[in-house]
Image: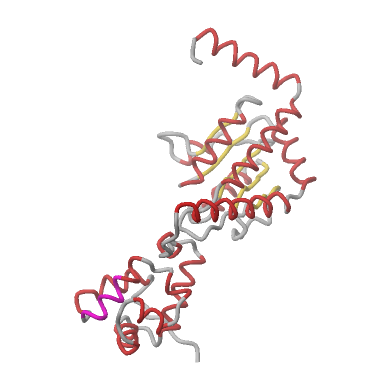
Amino acid sequence: MTPTRPERYHSIRKAIHQEYQDFTPGERSLADLILNFPGELIGYSASELARMAKTSNATVSRFVRRLGFENFDEMRRLAREEHELGAPLFLRSGANSSLADAVNAHLANVTRNLQETIGRLDLPKLQSLVEALATAPRVWVIGFRHSYYLAGYLRWSLVHARAQVHLIPAAGETLGESLVDVAPGDVCIGVVMRRRVANTIEILQVAQSKGARIAVITDPGMTGTEAFDWDLRCQSRTPGPIDDHAPALALIHIIVERVLAKSGTASRTRLGDIDDLHTGLGEL
């Protein structure tokens, strides 16, 4: 029989906070450990957590039942689901590593992510995106949350290669005000890294319904992109709470470099005009 999760809880943290005042001292030690490092639930057994919290197996069993779970495995299953969804607290590690070890581990992780991202690129598809970006009447770049800043970097980079590149949502504008001018022949790029805004797919579909061709730069876990023209996946996982965006930045760099090369004389003239304005204005 499959255990049924208590309906009143959507997260381990919410469950613990709601019951915290009624915990015994031993249960509070266990609660404090989980609240500080909830990701530990995934990798440890009930006995190991009891030892780390300096309490007993019986206390762990009472703690689990007080939260409304049938057993420890059911509570750990919920923690694993939150981990897979990318909840930052569930990605925290309690490991007390040295700075040198942390830097080396970070380098190794970024290297793996870059190799996996670049190794899986569909080069003909990427080339067709580059050609579309070089020739489309307008380019629209969409991003929310942390993806907004990646989208902003993509937009800032592309304006060196061509005109009519717009970031959505624009400052102070609603989505309707930002999307109203999307037209047939345009290209819309959604930067949609994980822990994404729930209606991002629908927003891109609106741009698609207005005749734009759609590209997504996203992580391997995104679904619902089958009807879009380009689907570029960037590995972003890390052992900690902050995703690795180096592969996404590297992909953006490749795209912009190729658009500059594809645009040829037009992009070189534009870069020259930008530099002339910099000089005339004394900006740099």
User: Magenta region's main secondary structure?
Assistant: helix
Residue at 80% x, 45% y is 124
Q: Position of residue 252 (x, y in %)?
A: 63, 39
In this view, 124 is above or below 20: above
Most extreme residue toward the left is: 21
Asked if residue 94 lies left or right of residue 215, the reply is left
Q: Position of residue 191 (x, y in %)?
A: 57, 45
In this view, 282 is above or below 15: above
Residue at 56% x, 50% y is 192
Residue at 39% x, 69% y is 38
Which residue range is magenta in the image? 25-32
- Quarter of the figure with residue 271: top right
- Quarter of the figure with residue 270: top right
Judge by depth and name the residue closer to the eye, 44 or 65.
44
Residue at 78% x, 46% y is 123
In this view, 220 is above or below 181: below
Looking at the image, can residue 243 be seen?
yes
Q: How many marks?
A: 0
In this view, 49 is above or below 197: below
Judge by depth and name the residue closer to the eye, 143 or 101.
101
Most extreme residue toward the top is: 280
Judge by depth and name the residue closer to the eye, 275 or 163.
275
